[in-house]
Amino acid sequence: MKKRTGMFCLLLVVLLVGVAAAQAQPTPITAIKAGRLIDPETGTAATNQVILIEGEKIKAVGPNLAIPAGATVFDLSKLTVLPGLVDAHTHMAITYKEQPENNYYYLTYIMESTPLRAIQAASNGIQLLNSGFTVVRDVGNNALYADAALRQAIEQGWLPGPTVIPSGPMIGSTGGQFWPTPEMYKDHNIMFPEYIDANSPDEIVRAIRENMLFGAKTIKLCIDCKPWGYSVEDIKLAISEAAKGGCKVEGHVQTADGAQRSIDAGIHMIAHGNALTPEHHRQMAEKGIFLAGTDMPFTPYRGNEQAFKRTVANLRDAWEKKVPLTFSTDLDYWNERMKNEKTGEWLTRGDLTIAFLETWKVAGIPQADILRAMTINGYKAADIIKERGPIKPGFYADLIAVTGDPLTDIDALRNVQFVMKNGMVFKKDGVMTPEKFFHPGPVRTPSGRWTR
Ligand SMILES: [Zn+2]
């Protein structure tokens, strides 16, 4: 017995020494010398700024800050530093193709498993981070919660990637976006997990609770994917139920009626700008409803001129009416033509995403407003603005740097030289340097399941 007590005491001493050693470890300090530092909120830039980062958060920002001895210093004095970018509507865990599925994404669901699609999402996340996207709203068509798994894997520290705001499966009334045969619908339940059928108030509540239970941080509704879509009352119910789990509601909208019902219910965000009229834009501006226009450019690999003209006109009108605009892509496809025309090299998921700038440029949106849509409005739409995004003390250290000045030439964003995520350097001198992100432990649960 005595021997045991002695062993216990020794163990206790070892543990206490271990704890003391862990506590004595100072949090690493990083200093960034920024030649120019953009504040997208005001559309202005300050020169020769120092950003001090302690661990994963920003500690101080200013022109003459003393850099503590022992700090790791990154000299970006020849670059423009700005907050990370946001794609406010995309789909990282689905890639439908011309071969073998002829762009029919029903086939993708059948042929590609959730694990395979989760790995695609992880790769897409890395490609997006490489292009400066530090936040991604990933809203549906992600098989069995591949989006929520990717968010958790990045938070736990398994791999680098943007902060993912996952929706889980899209919730819709009978059929979702599918038109299946009776056999496929009734005998094979082809709807799930790509869509959750929720027809009555009880089913809507249940579907939202399930998505939140499995990791959704936003709720995506198919407002009018079918003529029997959701009523104003249905949408209001969804908004109040989602709020209980800290989620906001985005509506997929493809008809004028669906848009009006979403606006009347006071939805957080409307996806896809095609069905919206100038009157809808006026009401959205009045109510502060975010628009994820998914404004596809006309390129050699996607789109047509007529559709592009309509997209440009809609985006322009939304901007004129002062709708809170976000930068959004709806990317979920790949084809053989997705190559750089000059070099012949494949375009990455990040390149394909940033290419949507073309629509904003043709619409004549001022550079500062494009940048605001890609940052501040994106953080607000993702509901993370209080802790992540702005380069200010107390916020997570997510930032990027580019050559040139995006406030006078938005295309400078196509050439991201430096990326920091949660205080860790992911890209330096234009090259990915992600080794710090890969480790077998500690496995982090940074903010618990129910907080952001
Ligand atoms: Zn979409």
Image (cartoon, helix red, strand yellow):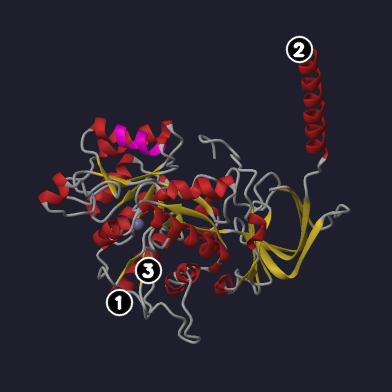
Q: Which mark is residue 1?
A: 2
Residue, disc 1: 304
Range of the magenta residues? 205-212
Quadrant of the image containing the N terminus: top right
Q: Position of 57 compared to 276: left or right?
A: right
Please state which amino acid type lies under the numbered disc 1.
Asn
Cβ atoms at labels 1 and 3 below 8 Å apart: no
Residue occupying image coordinates x 30% and y 32%: 206
**Height in image: 80 above or below 114?**
below
Q: Which mark is residue 296?
A: 3
State how far apart marks 2 and 1 are (Cα). Answer: 83 Å
**Circle 2 Cα neighbour tier, 10 Å, few/some/many (<14 / 14–19 / ≥20):** few
Please state which amino acid type lies under the numbered disc 3.
Met
* Ligand 1 under 8 Å from disc 3 Cβ: no
Residue occupying image coordinates x 55% and y 63%: 371
Of labels 2 and 1, earlier in sequence is 2
